[in-house]
Image (cartoon, grey):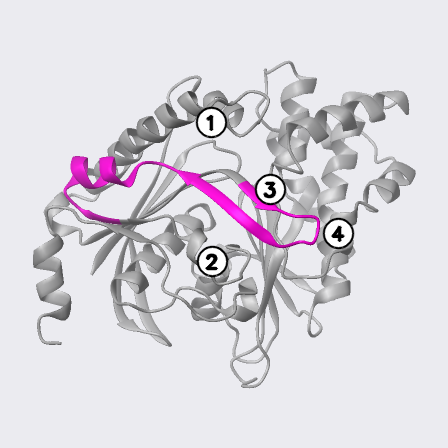
Amino acid sequence: MLVIGLMSGTSADAIDVALCEFQGAPPAIHLRMVHAVAFAYPDGFQARILDACLPEKSRVDTICQINFDMGELFAQAALYCIREASLKPEEVALIGSHGQTLWHQVGDDGRASATLQITEASILAERTGITTISNFRPRDIAAGGQGAPLTAYADWLLLRHPTKWRAIQNIGGIGNVTFLPPLSDTSSRPLSFDTGPGNALIDSATVILTEGRQAYDRDSTMAQAGHIDEDWLQTLALHPYYERRPPKTTGRELFGVPMATQLIKDGRARGLDGNSIIATLTALTAATIADAYRHYAPAPIEEVILGGGGGRNPFLVIMLEGLLPGTSVLKHEDVGLDSDNKEALVFALLAYETWHARPGNLPSLTGASKPVVLGQITPGNNYVDLLRKTWGNS
């Protein structure tokens, strides 16, 4: 079955598209990456998304419109990927769309009570003719879970080592980790949670400090030109989120532009230049990831597999390697996956599982009370034919 996965991450820097072929069922799902692209947003669209994430800037009418506008762009991205793969839309069975998270509501008690991902699935199904599965997070929250990180289910299926405990560490806008027991361990369960800021504070501070000339610290040139304020770093690491026990999730609601703006003021008050502020915020991401491993890893971690944009930040990777002595720090490419397209692949996989009426979560990963089938199905032109092919003999 050919399935497209679509994802726009916390940084809202592009639409990631992964066209995958799936066969089988857990625990023996076989996948092949057919084609993948990063579909750029039009000029100014990223700013529209990020403004919509801020209560002080967003409005119900703008959110309403951007939901439909993103549907159009996601449809264009899917069709572009299909053309690039020399295929036709009629040959693709499903689209799995995560959409764009605008808000993830987590209370003071750490419980996720609501979440909002936009990108109108009806537009996707109408423009492509392909049955679309979307809005994956809410069902897990309805079952008492955090609704994230959903990538952990794919990690459990695809990335366990025969004999070693692994940490699958994504460093997108937010950092999240999945601790995976080896295949030889039949009693331990995985654990997954958001470690804290990944690139969110670094990126937001870079935009502010460069007055918009840079969207992120490319090749960590700013961080490497600065110095780390160790005393300030220790203070920043005392934020209550880091002490909250998993499962736990967070987002730009906490580690976003308002926090970055305040931290720049605090850094200036300490006499730091812009480069040193970025260096210290980069160190914060590395330190909080390593600290999460020390406090919450169920067993000693022998391998870390990095994904997300933070894996291409040399300063961050070097710091993380220094904070995790005796641990091999690898990339997804080292284990046969493309880190740039990992999350899009995950939502293709989740759509495949939902279509076959199989759960897409593990309670030990999200905190849900039970495994549940995720997402909402919007029929495309192929819906009836797909039902017959999948369930005709049932």
Name the kind of residue labelled 4 in the image.
Tyr
Label 1 and label 3: CA atoms lie apart by 14 Å
**Percent position of residue 345, x then y:** 37, 53
**Labelled disc at residue 242:** 4
Name the kind of residue labelled 1 in the image.
Ile
Q: How many labels does the image show?
A: 4
- Residue 230 occupies quadrant: top right
In the rendered structure, which disc, 4 or 3, sits on the residue that comes first in sequence? 4
Label 3 and label 2: CA atoms lie apart by 19 Å
**Labelled disc at residue 273:** none
Q: Based on the picture, tell me whether residue 125 belongs to the magenta stretch.
A: yes
Label 3 sits on residue: 251
In the rendered structure, which disc, 3 or 2, sits on the residue that comes first in sequence? 2
- Residue 41 occupies quadrant: top left
Label 1 sits on residue: 49
Label 4 and label 3: CA atoms lie apart by 13 Å
- Point out the stretch of residues depicted in magenta: 104-132
In the rendered structure, which disc, 1 or 2, sits on the residue that comes first in sequence? 1
Q: Based on the picture, tell me whether residue 203 belongs to the magenta stretch.
A: no
Label 2 and label 4: CA atoms lie apart by 25 Å
Question: Who's the residue at 60% across and 30% down the image?
Answer: 218
In the rendered structure, which disc, 1 or 3, sits on the residue that comes first in sequence? 1
Label 2 sits on residue: 142
